Image (spheres, rainbow, N blue to C red):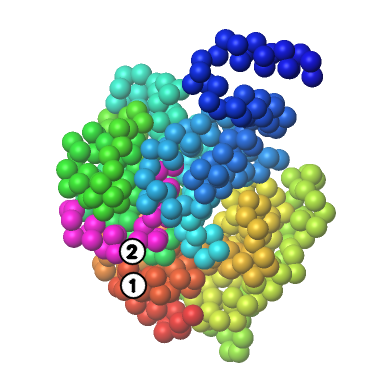
Amino acid sequence: MKRLLLLLTVLLIFSSPAWCQSGSYLDAVYQVYDDANASDPVEVLKDSIKTQFEIEIADDPDVNRWSKEWLDAVNTSLTALPASFRSATRMIYLEPSNLDFEVKYNGFNDQHGIVQMGYGSMFPSSVYTKKFKATYNRMPTSAEKIARFQYILARGMAYSFIQENPDVFKAYGKAVTYGEYPTRVYGPGAEANMVVLPGKNPLMIDLAFAIGEYCAAPNNLKTKSQARYDFVKNNVMGGATISGWGYKPVDDAASSTTDPGDDPGNVEIPTASGAPTIPDGDYLPIVTEVDVGTAAANLPTDWKTAPDLLKSAIVELFEVLPKFFSTCTQAIAYLPTTDTETAFSSEGFIFITQNSWFMPSFVELDDAARGKRFKEILLREMTLRFLYYHPEVTAKWKDTFGKSQSSFDAYVDMQQAVIGYFSAKDWLKQVNTARYNFIKTEFMKGTEF
């Protein structure tokens, strides 16, 4: 204590009069210093971001954790963005999955306003790096990888903004000419199998990409499309200009390399055998559990069997779905693993995983909210099972919404629309009446939820 008093005395003697005007300044400095050393710097920065921007920063420390460098990039990005745009985002979450996808968004129900960043968002895929090298004759620097991460973050936040401002999205369709702006994602995750927002369509992706580039590389966007630049500035950013974060877009035509995650050749070929017979009375698929042995050895015991509430959610969903749609799912198997996606499927079978129910751990979901989220994941895969048996619906979707759509893009588009129809029907009806009516007629045979 005597040493501290002596230090204070010496500092007071040699300090300027202006410094002396703040008697609590040194105490505050010591307090910040002590707190930073007593706490994890990452957690301190999380708290600072939450206090300043009212945005929660979350992760699963047992799987993948934010680094100080990543959070500094988040902080820089949020500082540059106007509050009117930031306000639609309430959480930025580092997805607890070892899959190398690059970005994941989630848009509605109990998880509205949550941007889920894939762990791969700081580690560009080989497809992206090859494109970068073909464009710039070198590999991206560490700073450029961070800038790319910031661009992805802004794009993710754009979906939250679009969700909350459907009128802005509608106006965007009148201000730009769709198809003149590249919206490809170079990475294994791409935009596939992601619950984004009700009825996400190519124009929504177009706007999200334009918002991302306006923030990260505004001069590039202005060169590509003055109309997009002006729209984002005036209608999304409230007139605010952003100096850019050093993001360097790749050239789509720089090489012949394609993203394997977006290759229509990887799309499952629909069966020619026709859909399963629709039975009389109620319908429920076979629901079973799969023992994956050592793959689940380190999981908590209660994660190794399908929870009762998960099974109940399956029953509840099948009670309300029309059998024309639901009978295309013939069996559902629970896999207690953590190294896979939330769900995947083939032919008439769906595999749901530990991630389907227990994750995300970042948000306090009650039983009802967790059930809603699970139903959306299951519906996503059930849509693919339906399309496997009904290729004529895919053909009609393309004829209606874009003859040039690949089957892959059409599948993703329909998955999002089905989820939106079930979980956020009023929003989908408002922004995509045509898609709403298509799902109602062709998928659900008039059933509304």
- Looking at numbered disc 1 in the image, what kind of residue is underneath it? Gln
Q: Earlier in the sequence, mark 2 or mark 1?
A: 2
**Circle 1 residues within 10 Å: few <14, some 14–19, many ≥20:** few
Query: Badges 2 and 1: C-beta atoms under 8 Å apart?
Result: yes
Which quarter of the picture shows residue 371?
A: bottom right
Identify the residue at horizontal 49%, vertical 76% (top origin): 325
**Quadrant position of the N terminus in the picture:** top right
Between the residue at mark 2 and the residue at mark 1, the CA separation in whole angstroms equals 8 Å
In reply to whether residue 158 is colored magenta, the answer given is yes
| Foreground of the two, 7 or 65 | 7
| Foreground of the two, 240 or 342 | 240
Q: Helix or strand or loop: what does disc 2 sit on? A: helix
Q: Where is residue 432 in the image (x, y as percent from the top left)?
A: 32, 69
Identify the residue at horizontal 24%, vertical 34% (top origin): 220
Identify the residue at horizontal 57%, vertical 10% (top origin): 14
Which quarter of the picture shows residue 226?
A: top left
**Circle 2 residues within 10 Å: few <14, some 14–19, many ≥20:** some
Identify the residue at horizontal 72%, vertical 66% (top origin): 288
Q: Is residue 244 above or below residue 90?
A: above
Which residue position is annotated with label 2? Answer: 166
In reply to whether residue 368 is colored magenta, the answer given is no
Give the magenta part as a residue range. 153-177
Q: Helix or strand or loop: what does disc 1 sit on? A: helix
Which quarter of the picture shows residue 82?
A: top left
Q: Position of residue 39 (x, y in %)?
A: 70, 32
Residue extending furthest right?
301
Q: Position of residue 323 (x, y in %)?
A: 53, 81
* Direction from residue 168 to residue 440 in the image, left or right: right
In the drawing, what numbered circle is on residue 430? 1
- Looking at numbered disc 2 in the image, what kind of residue is underneath it? Pro
| Foreground of the two, 115 or 244 | 244
